[in-house]
Amino acid sequence: MLTLKQSRRLQSVVVGTLSWAVALLIFFPIFWMILTSFKTEMDAIATPPQLFFAPTLENYLHINERSDYFSFAWNSVLISFSATVLSMLIAVPAAYSMAFHESRHTKRTLLWMLSTKMLPPVGVLMPIYLLCKSMGLLDSRIALIVIYTLINLPIVVWMVYTYFKDIPVDILEAARLDGATTFQEIGRVLLPIARGGLASTMLLSLILCWNEAFWSLNLTSSAAAPLTALVASYSSPEGLFWAKLSAVSTLACAPILIFGWISQKQLVRGLSFGAVK
Amino acid sequence: MADLSIRNLQKGFDGHAIIQGIDLDVRDREFVVFVGPSGCGKSTLLRLIAGLEEVTSGTISLDGKDITDLAPAKRDLAMVFQTYALYPHMTVRKNLSFALDLARVDKATVKAKVDNAARILELERLLERKPKQLSGGQRQRVAIGRAIVRNPKIFLFDEPLSNLDAALRVQTRLELARLHKELKATMIYVTHDQVEAMTLADKVVVLNGGRVEQVGSPLDLYNHPANLFVAGFLGTPKMGFLRGTVGAVDGSSCEVQLEAGAKLTLPRQACGQKAGASVTLGVRPEHFNIVPAGEGQLQVVADVSERLGSDTYCHVRTANGEQLTIRVRGDFGPAYGQPLELAFDTAHCHLFDAAGVAIDKRSAAEQAA
Amino acid sequence: MNSSALDTVAGTPAAAPRAKPRTLKPGWFLVSPSVALLLLWMIVPLGMTVYFSLIRYNLLSPGENEFVGLENFEFFVTDPGFMPGALHTLTLVGSVLAISVIFGVLISALLEACEFWGRGIVRVLLISPFFIMPTVSALLWKNLIFHPVSGILAAIWRFFGAQPVDWLAHHPLMSIIFIVSWQWLPFAILILMTAMQSLDQDQKEAARLDGAGPIAIFWHLTLPHLARPIAVVVMIETIFLLSVFAEIFTTTSGGPGYESTNLAYLIYNQALLQFDVGMASAGGLIAVLIANIAAIILVRMIGKNLTDQQ
């Protein structure tokens, strides 16, 4: 018979080993991608795959030569940040109103907003494509910014609403009694208190914009194309430079991956619409 | 000056009437306590006064000026919330000065007022801390300080002590009473705790189901409850009630036959009840005496007793199953199931008619005075 | 939405005619920008889609935009790609949901079973795929994992003396389900793990004192506690899975044949490769219809769960 302490320790070892195995398995593709990005093209396609090799930085050094990496990256940054800021500007007043001045339409409005998210993009691909075409907005950053703002708006409203709901309404009432106008109430009391939640909402919006790949592939070709489009262009047959592809991919994903790691805990609360504490 | 007057105030919410027509006056420098069971509308009434809820109909005026539809900030009132509602992202100093900063009061005045409030409440050493770093009692004091700084016409308190532990509650209660005297302030205070109501108030307003049951000084309410609700709500342990019917009535007394068995003659100048009418007799625990067998009017059986040291609360049952509590000396403790005999202090008994309204024992002359 | 003057006038017609300056609540105008924008976003393109779907409209043959009724729908539905497309869409959504919920529950239960060395790092490793952009993960799997010559799987197959498989050519839909699951399983783990941490420890201890073993606790306490988070996972993932596109675009291009085509890709194919706007619009509407059926079912199932919080 094992003592209670021994059986606890055994359990911990078994659970730990299993968990590590699962985690390494799931993380393996990313690990392999990063590894490949430091290989020469010869090592990258070697059979069997090489775990040990002479690492090289040449892929990273040559990224900008093959494709104008920095212009794509700049597009990604610009589009993601603009769309995020824009959707926050629109969503915060709406979430404030719904969280603290609830009316009998509030819940329906919220659910309706979420339901617009169910509209598959393909359903409106043609009109948006033609509208952009007729307005000369094909391959323009503005079109993507507007579209990303709109497609993320429901989720952003929901998340901000969820975070606002956590703030005791008393504090806002106290501010109102202290003489704050609606504007001051939001700006000087609500937003500073909710800044953690707002930050993680913005983060999620950034992640979604950064990784969006339907509209960016369909509406841009080069000038306004973000990193998703750049990476996709490697799927064409002439792009069989795996090491370079891995380097580009690593660079394209690294910022968001790091953001995500840092903020994973805060993301959950908003993402689950308050269903998880 | 701070005279608040409320006329026929009503508040409905989704077709529910929460406040059903309240008339009330609060005089300058008065400490008024709204008390009642949960859901009686006391908090709603306070929030209507504060302007945090919209009035459905009726008016609220302050010093003769109609403030019914005024924005909360323009009413010159300050409120202390049950949860304190401190701004978590600001230091204590910023919390105290926020209202003044919004009103663009000059810096020197703000500093003077904040320092003064901090001195009154002994918050000086905490001014640079954030609310998170304060204890419950300290947060409570900051919340009060926030109200003091604004020098409002009326202070509103929404159950301010309910989040404190018992010892701190007693201490803060005393501080509030002292503050009221020192600041010469007008205060409206909401609580469900009748001890707070009795100890703090100049005037108690007992609310029930969105209506005012009775308004008066604490002792007035204690000694002359207007109806069964007030009689049962104020006082610990609760007043005991015995059902009965009116017997013979004459000009100075009235006879009551209790279902529990006893027959009492109560001094009543104007009873106004016909013989045979059903009434309820109310007796506070201190107005019973336990007497040797044969000397009392009512036979009861002892239930459990609570011995507090100074007093003993004996819970007893009458022959027809009615429950009473009797307050006796601390050294007395009857055994469970022991038969006891009670005598009534008939001068202090309350009588209520079938509708629950008190049949006043005072003479018309006494009432006028 | 709040307290518009109209509301009150209509609501209390006989109320005392006090002129009420509505100073107490900020107006509905705070919500309306979002509502208006989303309404526009829904109505304008959708209206245009409806219109396009009823006319003949091909960018290659301009000028012949006559009304054709439901012809486009008929063509789209009878297109050899439609049935596989619709079926693959449902298979994809269903399989990925099943995989991410089942494995999500198991893996998060494993991680929350007890404290062990490096749990923080394990958690970070597990959720990483969620942050990888779809085009990257598709190419990563296509070239580095699934590749029949130099992919990892090929190497493993050879190690065991088996013939390497060309996954994307021979099992295209399964491969795509695998890729998409890899992206979305972390999301389920992230949500479910956090949900498990909020399970009342007292409840667990009470159950243990009542003689419940780990399996009984998992079955009778943990799973019921997870009902809501699972609903959330299903809802969010469905939204995104119904329109999986980049993963197909970058790996199989829907092929071979229609074997890995879903509706999103089929419509893209009609619209931007064959320039048939009319038919693409009809297809878009059918996709919207399918999505709405799913949405209605989901909102019925869990919409209440989401708004009735606390």
Image: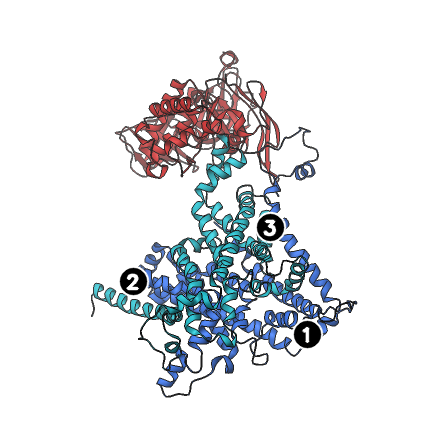
Chain colours: A cyan, B red, C blue
SS for dot 3: helix
Disc 3/disc 2 C-alpha distance (Å): 43 Å
Task: Mark 2 or mark 1: name the one nearer the start of the chain.
Answer: 1
Chain ID, mark 1: C
In this figure, which residue is indicated by the disc labeled 1?
C77
Residue B254 in the image: state x and y as whole percent.
Answer: 50, 20
- Judge if badges 2 and 1 mark residues of a common chain: yes
Residue C298, relative to residue C88: is it above or below? above
Which of C171/B65 is in front?
C171
Q: What residue type is labelled 1?
A: Val
The percent position of residue C104, horizontal first and vertical second, equals 42, 66
Residue that numbered label 3 is attached to: A109
Residue C104 is left or right of residue A98, and the answer is left
Is residue B244 something that shows in the picture? no
Relative to A165, does residue B126 appear above or below in the rendering? above
**Mark 3 and mark 2 residues within 8 Å of each other at the beta carbon:** no
